[in-house]
Image (cartoon, helix red, strand yellow):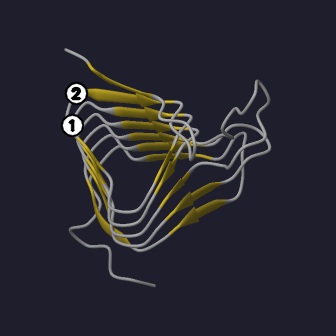
Amino acid sequence: MANLNNKLANRISLRGDEGEPFNVGQIAGMANDVVFHALASTNLTLGDHVGYGPRVLVHGGRQVINGVANGPETSVGDNVGLGPNSLIYSAVIGNNSAIGRKSAVFNSTLPARTYVRSRVIVADRRPGNNGMILPVEW
Protein backbone atom coordinates (compact mmCIF):
# COMPACT_ATOMS: atom_id res chain seq x y z
CA MET A 1 0.00 0.00 0.00
CA ALA A 2 1.21 3.49 -0.85
CA ASN A 3 2.36 5.81 1.90
CA LEU A 4 -0.43 8.38 2.26
CA ASN A 5 1.22 10.50 4.95
CA ASN A 6 0.77 14.20 4.15
CA LYS A 7 -1.54 13.36 1.22
CA LEU A 8 -4.86 13.10 3.03
CA ALA A 9 -6.46 15.77 5.17
CA ASN A 10 -9.48 15.53 7.50
CA ARG A 11 -13.23 14.88 7.14
CA ILE A 12 -13.05 12.84 3.93
CA SER A 13 -16.15 10.81 3.10
CA LEU A 14 -16.47 7.84 0.75
CA ARG A 15 -20.17 7.09 0.72
CA GLY A 16 -20.75 3.52 -0.34
CA ASP A 17 -24.37 3.33 0.79
CA GLU A 18 -25.84 3.31 -2.72
CA GLY A 19 -23.45 2.72 -5.61
CA GLU A 20 -20.46 0.46 -5.76
CA PRO A 21 -17.71 -0.30 -6.44
CA PHE A 22 -15.47 2.69 -5.84
CA ASN A 23 -12.27 2.54 -7.86
CA VAL A 24 -9.77 5.01 -6.42
CA GLY A 25 -6.35 5.38 -8.01
CA GLN A 26 -3.17 6.75 -6.46
CA ILE A 27 -3.99 10.05 -4.76
CA ALA A 28 -1.77 13.07 -5.47
CA GLY A 29 -3.31 15.00 -2.56
CA MET A 30 -6.64 15.41 -0.83
CA ALA A 31 -7.67 18.44 1.22
CA ASN A 32 -10.32 18.73 3.94
CA ASP A 33 -13.99 17.92 3.45
CA VAL A 34 -13.77 15.92 0.20
CA VAL A 35 -16.82 13.71 -0.52
CA PHE A 36 -17.28 10.83 -2.98
CA HIS A 37 -20.76 9.41 -3.44
CA ALA A 38 -22.25 7.16 -6.13
CA LEU A 39 -25.90 6.80 -7.02
CA ALA A 40 -27.59 3.40 -6.78
CA SER A 41 -26.47 0.80 -9.31
CA THR A 42 -23.52 2.88 -10.53
CA ASN A 43 -19.83 2.86 -9.80
CA LEU A 44 -17.33 5.65 -9.39
CA THR A 45 -13.86 5.55 -10.95
CA LEU A 46 -11.15 7.99 -9.88
CA GLY A 47 -7.82 7.88 -11.73
CA ASP A 48 -4.21 8.06 -10.61
CA HIS A 49 -2.47 11.25 -9.46
CA VAL A 50 -5.67 13.25 -8.93
CA GLY A 51 -5.47 16.29 -6.67
CA TYR A 52 -8.62 17.08 -4.68
CA GLY A 53 -9.01 20.61 -3.32
CA PRO A 54 -10.96 21.46 -0.19
CA ARG A 55 -14.70 20.70 -0.27
CA VAL A 56 -14.61 18.85 -3.61
CA LEU A 57 -17.68 16.71 -4.28
CA VAL A 58 -17.50 13.89 -6.83
CA HIS A 59 -20.98 12.45 -7.21
CA GLY A 60 -21.42 9.37 -9.33
CA GLY A 61 -24.21 8.42 -11.61
CA ARG A 62 -24.92 7.90 -15.29
CA GLN A 63 -25.20 10.67 -17.83
CA VAL A 64 -28.72 11.27 -19.12
CA ILE A 65 -29.00 10.98 -22.90
CA ASN A 66 -32.34 11.59 -24.61
CA GLY A 67 -34.07 11.56 -21.25
CA VAL A 68 -32.68 8.17 -20.20
CA ALA A 69 -29.86 7.56 -17.73
CA ASN A 70 -27.92 5.26 -20.03
CA GLY A 71 -24.75 7.25 -20.73
CA PRO A 72 -21.29 6.78 -19.27
CA GLU A 73 -20.82 6.56 -15.53
CA THR A 74 -18.88 9.16 -13.57
CA SER A 75 -15.13 8.93 -13.86
CA VAL A 76 -12.15 11.19 -13.34
CA GLY A 77 -9.06 10.45 -15.44
CA ASP A 78 -5.39 10.42 -14.48
CA ASN A 79 -3.43 13.58 -13.60
CA VAL A 80 -6.51 15.72 -12.96
CA GLY A 81 -6.75 18.70 -10.63
CA LEU A 82 -10.07 19.45 -8.95
CA GLY A 83 -10.10 22.96 -7.51
CA PRO A 84 -11.60 24.00 -4.18
CA ASN A 85 -15.40 23.73 -3.98
CA SER A 86 -15.65 22.05 -7.39
CA LEU A 87 -18.45 19.60 -8.16
CA ILE A 88 -18.46 16.67 -10.59
CA TYR A 89 -21.83 14.98 -11.15
CA SER A 90 -22.66 12.30 -13.76
CA ALA A 91 -19.63 13.38 -15.77
CA VAL A 92 -16.46 12.03 -17.34
CA ILE A 93 -13.30 14.12 -16.92
CA GLY A 94 -10.49 13.21 -19.34
CA ASN A 95 -6.83 12.74 -18.39
CA ASN A 96 -4.61 15.76 -17.72
CA SER A 97 -7.56 18.10 -17.12
CA ALA A 98 -8.24 20.77 -14.50
CA ILE A 99 -11.49 22.00 -13.00
CA GLY A 100 -11.30 25.48 -11.47
CA ARG A 101 -12.37 26.74 -8.07
CA LYS A 102 -16.15 26.80 -7.49
CA SER A 103 -16.88 25.21 -10.88
CA ALA A 104 -19.30 22.41 -11.65
CA VAL A 105 -19.46 19.79 -14.40
CA PHE A 106 -22.83 18.05 -14.90
CA ASN A 107 -23.95 15.38 -17.38
CA SER A 108 -20.88 15.97 -19.54
CA THR A 109 -17.90 14.24 -21.10
CA LEU A 110 -14.79 16.42 -21.18
CA PRO A 111 -11.90 15.27 -23.38
CA ALA A 112 -8.30 14.98 -22.19
CA ARG A 113 -6.50 18.25 -21.47
CA THR A 114 -9.66 20.24 -20.80
CA TYR A 115 -9.39 23.30 -18.57
CA VAL A 116 -12.54 24.64 -16.94
CA ARG A 117 -12.01 28.12 -15.53
CA SER A 118 -13.03 29.04 -12.00
CA ARG A 119 -16.69 29.84 -11.32
CA VAL A 120 -18.05 28.12 -14.43
CA ILE A 121 -20.86 25.61 -14.87
CA VAL A 122 -20.51 23.05 -17.68
CA ALA A 123 -23.76 21.18 -18.36
CA ASP A 124 -24.81 18.64 -20.97
CA ARG A 125 -21.54 18.70 -22.90
CA ARG A 126 -20.93 15.43 -24.71
CA PRO A 127 -19.33 14.44 -28.01
CA GLY A 128 -21.49 15.97 -30.74
CA ASN A 129 -23.20 18.34 -28.28
CA ASN A 130 -21.59 21.68 -27.37
CA GLY A 131 -23.63 21.96 -24.19
CA MET A 132 -23.74 24.98 -21.95
CA ILE A 133 -20.79 26.70 -20.37
CA LEU A 134 -21.93 29.49 -18.10
CA PRO A 135 -20.01 31.78 -15.75
CA VAL A 136 -21.48 32.16 -12.27
CA GLU A 137 -20.87 34.42 -9.29
CA TRP A 138 -20.87 32.59 -5.98
The relative height of residue 29 versus residue 53 in the rendered view (above or below) is below
Labels 1 and 2 touching (C-beta < 8 A): yes
Q: Nearer the viewer, residue 110 or 10?
A: 110
Give amino acid for label 1: Arg
The relative height of residue 50 versus residue 62 in the rendered view (above or below) is below
Q: Which residue is mark 1?
A: 101
Q: Which residue is mark 2?
A: 119
Identify the image quadrant of residue 126: top right
Please identify, in this view, whether the residue under mark 1 or under mark 2 is nearer the observer.
2
Give amino acid for label 2: Arg
Horizontal side, residue 20 vs residue 2: left or right: right
Disc 2 crowd rating (10 Å Cα; few below 14, some 14-19, many 20+) is some
Q: Earlier in the sequence, mark 1 or mark 2?
A: 1
The relative height of residue 80 versus residue 20 in the rendered view (above or below) is below
Residue 97 place in picture, x, y as percent: 32, 58
Disc 1 crowd rating (10 Å Cα; few below 14, some 14-19, many 20+) is many
